[in-house]
Image (spheres, rainbow, N blue to C red):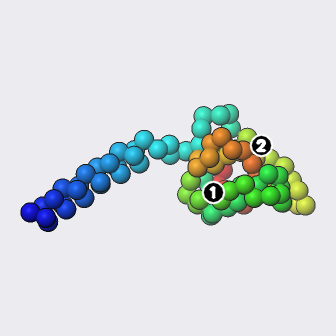
Amino acid sequence: MKRRLLHAGTAVLVVLAGTTAAAAPASASDAPGFVCNLNQNTWLRTDPHGFVLRTLSAGRGFRWHGQAIDDGSVWIYGHGAEAPGQDGWIPAVNANC
């Protein structure tokens, strides 16, 4: 009986986890810009070479709003899928656009 309850509880958890994953956004918000794919974990910064705001995960979306060149490096401005409300800068080499 205990084993049957354990299996039923596990099935409920799997169904709930699947429902939650389906509701989560797969890419950045619909703000203007192109959607890129992060090719490695990268830091979202306040400005090129600035303070770190958060870490963005490889394989997730990044909404590109603009770019700049600083010390010969190209940086892109936008936000990651993990934080669509927080814009910042990442090195362009860390995204496939």
Quarter of image, res 48: bottom right
Q: Nearer the viewer, residue 4 or 44?
A: 4
The answer to whether any part of residue 7 appears in the image is yes
Q: Nearer the viewer, residue 51 or 39?
A: 51
Image location of residue 32, percent across then percent down: 68, 33
Q: Residue at x 9, y 63 (%)?
A: 1
Q: Residue at x 72, y 54 (%)?
A: 53
- Sequence-wise, the earlier of marks 2 and 1 is 1
Image location of residue 88, percent across then percent down: 75, 48
Residue at which label 1 appears: 56
Query: Dot 2, how many residues are within 10 Å of its Cα: few (below 14), some (14-19), or many (20+)?
Result: few
Are discs 2 and 1 less than 8 Å apart at CB?
Answer: no
Residue 41's place in the image compared with 47, above or below, is below
Q: Secondary structure at mark 1?
A: strand
Q: Nearer the viewer, residue 75 or 56?
A: 56
- What's the amino acid at mark 2? Gly
Q: Residue at x 59, y 47 (%)?
A: 81
Q: Residue at x 65, y 40 (%)?
A: 85
Q: Residue furthest left?
A: 1
Q: Residue furthest right?
A: 71
Marks 2 and 1: which is nearer the front? 1
Q: Is residue 19 left or right of residue 65?
A: left
- What's the amino acid at mark 1? Leu
Query: Dot 1, how many residues are within 10 Å of its Cα: few (below 14), some (14-19), or many (20+)?
Result: many
Q: Is residue 45 left or right of residue 15?
A: right
Count of numbered circles on the image: 2
Quarter of image, res 63: top right
Image location of residue 26, percent across then percent down: 50, 46
Q: Secondary structure at mark 2?
A: strand
Spatial CA span between label 2 and label 1? 18 Å
Residue at which label 2 appears: 66
